[in-house]
């Protein structure tokens, strides 16, 4: 019987796929499975594991053997420090040998790895630390500064003392975890609650992830893969890191802030053939004059937001193949794909894709009943016999392609980043001059959506608006702040006294194009 990796025609995938066929891709089973072993140690005799474009302009590579040794030393260090299985280890580092080594070292130990975005401000870090209560927070530098802002956690920096302690440890570690043991807490602004939520993943997640890896990203042995998304977030962590490594394919990514010139240079330097990124990345690269070599990048996928027509046309013309959509949620996984690199599948421009193998997807009404073809409702996936809504509205055409029709909640997706309107509001409300605030998503040509804040305050003017934007930037993240601000006398409220965000959205819709205040 052919391996699931050998089935490369879309009609054959539909006919032959089974969840059981994913098992032979791994060495572990239900009783004994470790995500780090599957992604790192079993490939230690192979070649390159990491291809990194550093923030200072260098292009570096690290082998699977280096990653296996670093992560084993870290696992041994955690054990020596008394960090037990199931305890959390937070990692706030840029993509580097240290980041991936710490991530997989924590997982080897049986601890729970918690990657955190390096551009988070103190409030954003404190929220997540208070929620998951890690034993250790690993940072690049300034351990004392971070220690003063989080309590009950040991903050450690990558300094000489840490390097010496790490070097003392054995570079061999035998993982001892079961498939259902916790492995990773991955934070998201989410769709099920207002504040950041840790989605809890077990070691088994590396197996179910293969559906997205094979049919959403189109990964196959021999790919030279690159994903510029931060591994602190879902796309960069699961699809950009764990998926390729589990298949023995090197990770390729950027450290530091995104720069389109460095992105383009990395693709050329590493001779990349498969790229996965947010649509904004492709838009920015195109705007900066990116001219990819036609025919070299055979597979190009995107997720996080719909892709605009101009960028889609640019990529199709420049690459010689259509960019492929991948859609899902952190809580559920990827459920709609465009099968990059598979013969017989036709990408439909503007659609989110077709159901991934093994998933039953529908558009449902408010009663949870699938609507007729072309009808608008909530996109949902069947789980344990019931329809689970993903909190996006959409419609399905006669050929089974699903199309997006807007968000169903107050989560904002801007340039591929998922943000919480409520989290931004809470930081705004801590400003001494802000009396009330509400945040909604508004349409933006470059980013798809941006957060707009309606603020009640005695002060006004452009200087004050910039001040409160900076207030949020420094406390949450450099990307998570209201890019538009309007000072208002009062916020509209429902009869129950809640802020009427629907009225604010309707108010925005009444403005002419470009007429936002």
Image (tube, grey):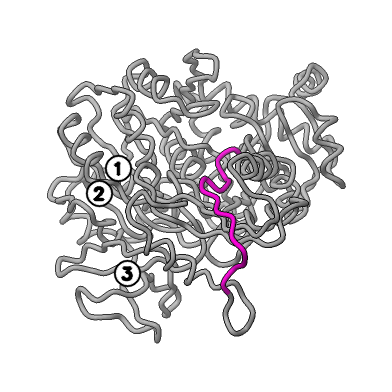
Q: CA distance from mark 2 to mark 3?
A: 16 Å
Earlier in the chain: of badge 2 and badge 1, it is 1
Query: Dot 1 corresponds to which residue?
Result: 218
Residues at badges 2 and 1 in contact (C-beta under 8 Å)? Answer: yes
User: Circle 2 — which element?
Assistant: loop
Earlier in the chain: of badge 1 and badge 3, it is 1
Instruction: Pinpoint residue 246: horizontal percent, then vertical percent.
Output: 46, 40
| Res. 87 in view | no
In the image, what residue occupies the spot 43% across and 72% down? 389
In the image, what residue occupies the spot 79% across and 47% down? 84
Query: Dot 2 corresponds to which residue?
Result: 339
User: Circle 3 — which element?
Assistant: strand
Answer few, some or many: residues within 10 Å of disc 3's Cα (few below 14, many 20 plus, some between 14 and 19). Answer: many
Nearer the observer, 511 or 350 = 511
Instruction: Pinpoint residue 237: horizontal percent, then vertical percent.
Output: 51, 42
Left or right relative to 210: residue 194: right
Q: Is residue 144 above or below residue 21?
A: above
Query: Dot 3 corresponds to which residue?
Result: 361
Front disc: 1 or 3: 3
Answer few, some or many: residues within 10 Å of disc 1's Cα (few below 14, many 20 plus, some between 14 and 19). Answer: many
Q: CA distance from mark 2 to mark 1?
A: 6 Å
* Predominant SS along the magenta part: loop
In the image, what residue occupies the spot 36% across and 53% down? 211
Left or right relative to 152: residue 454: left
């Amino acid at each position: 019987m052919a391996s699931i990796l050998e089935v490369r025609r879309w009609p054959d995938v539909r006919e032959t796929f089974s969840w059981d066929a994913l098992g032979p891709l791994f060495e572990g089973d239900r009783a004994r499975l470790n995500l780090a072993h599957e992604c790192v140690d079993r490939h230690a005799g192979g070649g390159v594991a990491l291809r990194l474009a550093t923030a200072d302009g260098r292009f570096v590579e690290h082998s699977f053997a280096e990653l296996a040794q670093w992560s084993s030393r870290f696992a041994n260090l955690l054990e020596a420090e008394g960090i037990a299985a199931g305890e959390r280890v937070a990692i706030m580092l840029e993509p580097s040998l240290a980041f991936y080594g710490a991530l997989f070292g924590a997982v080897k130990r049986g601890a729970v790895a918690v990657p955190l975005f390096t551009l988070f401000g103190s409030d954003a870090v404190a929220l997540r630390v208070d929620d998951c209560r890690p034993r250790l927070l690993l940072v690049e530098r300034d351990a004392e500064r971070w220690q003063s802002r989080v309590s009950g956690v040991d903050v450690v920096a990558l300094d000489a003392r840490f390097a010496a302690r790490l070097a003392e440890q054995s570079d061999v570690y035998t993982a001892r975890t079961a498939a259902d043991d916790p492995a990773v807490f991955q934070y998201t602004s989410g769709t099920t609650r207002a504040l950041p939520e840790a989605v809890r993943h077990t070691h088994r997640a590396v197996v179910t992830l293969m559906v997205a890896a094979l049919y959403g990203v189109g990964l196959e042995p021999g790919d030279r893969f690159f994903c510029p998304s931060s591994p602190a977030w879902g796309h960069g962590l699961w699809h950009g890191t764990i998926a390729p490594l589990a298949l023995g394919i090197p990770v390729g990514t950027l450290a530091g802030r995104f720069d389109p010139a460095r992105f383009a240079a990395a693709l050329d330097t590493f001779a990349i053939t498969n790229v996965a990124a947010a649509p904004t990345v492709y838009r920015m690269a195109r705007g900066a004059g990116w001219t990819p070599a036609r025919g070299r990048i055979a597979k190009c996928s995107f997720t996080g937001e719909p892709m605009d027509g101009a960028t889609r046309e640019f990529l199709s013309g420049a690459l010689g193949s259509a960019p492929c959509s991948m859609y899902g949620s952190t809580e559920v996984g990827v459920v709609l794909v465009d099968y990059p690199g598979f013969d017989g599948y036709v990408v439909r421009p503007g659609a989110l894709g077709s159901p991934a193998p093994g998933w039953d997807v529908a558009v449902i009404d408010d009663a949870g009943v699938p609507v007729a073809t072309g009808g608008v409702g909530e996109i949902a996936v069947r789980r344990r016999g019931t329809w689970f809504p993903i909190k996006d509205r959409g419609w399905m055409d006669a050929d089974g392609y699903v199309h997006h029709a807007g968000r169903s909640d107050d989560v904002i997706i801007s340039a591929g980043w998922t943000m919480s309107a409520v989290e931004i509001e809470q930081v705004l409300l801590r400003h001494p001059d802000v009396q009330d605030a509400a945040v909604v998503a508004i349409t933006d040509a470059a980013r798809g959506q941006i957060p707009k804040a309606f603020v009640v305050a005695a002060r006004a003017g452009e200087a004050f608006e910039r001040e409160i934007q900076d207030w949020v930037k420094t406390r949450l993240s450099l990307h998570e702040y209201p890019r538009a601000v309007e000072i208002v006398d009062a916020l509209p409220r429902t009869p129950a006294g809640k802020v009427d965000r629907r009225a604010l959205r309707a108010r925005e819709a009444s403005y002419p194009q470009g007429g936002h205040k």
